[in-house]
Image (tube, rainbow, N blue to C red):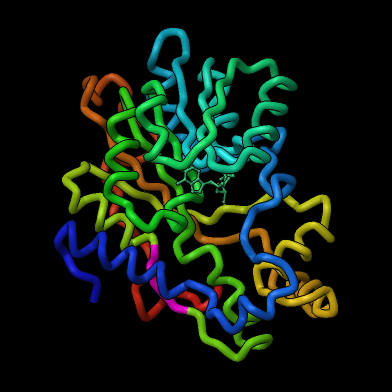
Amino acid sequence: MPPEDCAELARYWAESLAEWAIPDEILAKAPEPPWGLPPGLFTPPPEPADTPSRRVALAPLQAKPGGGSVLDIGAGGGAASFALVPPATRLTAVDQSPAMLRSFAERAAERGVEAVTVEGSWPDVAVSVDPADVVVCHNVLYNVADPVPFLTALTEHAELRVVIQITANHPRARLSPLWSRFWGITMPQRPRATDALDLVRAMGLPAESQSFTTARPPVENRSELVAFVRRQLCVGPERDGEIERWISENGFGERQAVCIWWDTGRIQRSRYELDDVPAVIQPDLPDDDQAPAVA
Ligand SMILES: C[S@@+](CC[C@H](N)C(=O)[O-])C[C@H]1O[C@@H](n2cnc3c(N)ncnc32)[C@H](O)[C@@H]1O
């Protein structure tokens, strides 16, 4: 059972994440480094999906005259923040990847959106970033080994609300069957979104949550996806056929995601109470025994 107190939960998160480290003997055999995300797989869709994460981020912006500003942490290509324009009129993207920020800036120019990019790791660069009305952070938290300063800096930069989205299970969990097939190793089961929610609440943040199924838009460049999966699995192109078949059979689009959000208390929440999202949502996340082996 995960622990309950904040420092313990943060340590549990870090230790559980550390178990996802790829064993040295496998890394030594990897034909190319398994790290890095191809910007092409993180381009925002032309029409944003109507997700709980988008709705809870839109609500305070819609209530604000003039639309407001959004700070997107670990922005990638900007899927989380471009989905809020309009009503948002100004975006700031923070990302440690220059390639992702270039992709973000290209999308902003194409769409005529006022945008600033900040290269660097959050929260290290937080001091040089202005607060925004809404802070969004999608699909980043499983990359954060020291979550308390990260989450604190998100809160300090949100005038109104912080909205986090993460997958219910670790994003690499869905490749667990392939790790076992190619390398004979069993990948861990934790941490999960439930652990993140427990931690956020243990920090004293008034977090609410909702789980939902998210669908990645169809990947136009299938060979880019296969190459990404192959690289993550530390195998060579001779495995591409097997990977391609596995993706076709298992799908790579849908997975369970969780939206976790909290208000920062700088305005009265009643000004933007949500109509279509209940104010308090009991997390209906899978418990330990029911969690799928593949996310
Ligand atoms: C999986 S991508 C998600 C991109 C985007 N938020 C989305 O949902 O499409 C994670 C992004 O977070 C960035 N990232 C991870 N940890 C970060 C950190 N501590 N500070 C800044 N960027 C980070 C990565 O470079 C990457 O672009």
At 33% from the left edge and 70% from the top edge, which residue is drawn? 15
Where residue 218 sits: x, y (%)? 75, 52
Where does the image place residue 39, in percent across and percent down from the top left?
70, 45
Q: Looking at the picture, does residue 7 appear above or below residue 235? A: above
Can residue 115 be found in the magenta stretch? Answer: no
Q: Nearer the viewer, residue 55 or 207?
A: 207
Of all residues, the one furthest to the front in this rendering is 28
Residue visible at 38% across and 60% down? 193
Give the farthest residue toward the top: 66
User: Taking 126 as reference, is 110 above or below it?
Assistant: above
Q: On the picture, is 281 further left or further right than 139?
A: left
Residue segment shown in magenta: 188-192
Q: Which residue shows up at 38% across the image and 68% down it?
A: 191
With respect to residue 121, does 90 lie above or below? above
Tell me the residue at 69%/41% (across/down): 43
Dominant secondary structure, magenta: loop
